[in-house]
Image (cartoon, rainbow, N blue to C red):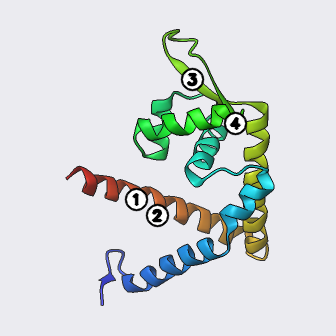
Amino acid sequence: MMTDTTDGGEFDLLTVLPRLSRLGTVMNRSRLIERATANAGTDLDRPALSVLITLHTGDGPLRVGEIAKRMQVVGPHITRQVHELERLGLARRIPDPVDQRARLVELTPEGAAAVARYMQTVLDLLGDVLHDWSPEDRQTFGRLLERFATDLTARLQTLDEE
């Protein structure tokens, strides 16, 4: 068994794999994404939803390249998604006030409302799950999940670059 004893204690790393697998399976089987999408009143796929969420959490309009960077994908994928979101009236391109040659992407009011409904459905479910957790446990969970996601992302990016 692989153990990590870098902090002085023992932790069985093999216990993480089935838990991650189970979490992925539960998320897929629960149809959470599909339920939240239906509640949002859209028929978008996951990549399009990811663009909407990225714009929603982006503190203002973003360039296609910035959306791609935040989503960790290549620009052409985002360009296709933005075209579809524009066609559906959920996003629009506007001039970049800093560089008039460039364009930014922003949510339309319809897009903002749809992503808000989507996110509220997901947040309501997560809130229900964490309802009986102590505030300290919720904070610890959030902090450790963020750390794990950040560290795993960085490590996988390093492997991709090698």
Crowding around mark 1 (Cα neighbors within 10 Å: few <14, some 14 to 19, many 20+) is: few
Q: Quadrant of residue 35?
A: bottom right
> What's the distance in space between the residues labelled 1 and 2, CA to CA?
5 Å
Q: In the image, which disc is placed on residue 104?
A: 3
Q: Quadrant of residue 135?
A: bottom right
**Looking at the image, do the residues carrying marks 1 and 2 touch, with CB atoms under 8 Å apart?**
yes
Q: Give how far across and how far down residue 11 sits, in percent.
A: 40, 84
**Mark 2 or mark 4, whichever is nearer to me:** 4
Judging depth in this view, the residue of 29 and 138 nearest the camera is 29
What residue lies at 56% left-to-right and 29% top-to-bottom? Answer: 62
What residue lies at 60% left-to-right and 37% top-to-bottom? Answer: 84
> What's the distance in space between the residues labelled 3 and 1, CA to CA?
30 Å
What residue lies at 67% left-to-right and 39% top-to-bottom? Answer: 56
**Mark 4 or mark 3, whichever is nearer to me:** 4
Q: In the image, which disc is placed on residue 151?
A: 1
Q: Give how far across and how far down residue 127 sits, in percent.
A: 76, 66
Judging depth in this view, the residue of 109 and 149 nearest the camera is 109
> What's the distance in space between the residues labelled 4 and 3, CA to CA?
17 Å
Q: Give how far across and how far down residue 138 sits, in percent.
A: 68, 68
Q: Amino acid at mark 3?
A: Leu
Residue for badge 2 = 148
Q: In the image, which disc is placed on residue 88?
A: 4
> What's the distance in space between the residues labelled 2 and 4, CA to CA?
36 Å
Q: Amino acid at mark 2?
A: Phe
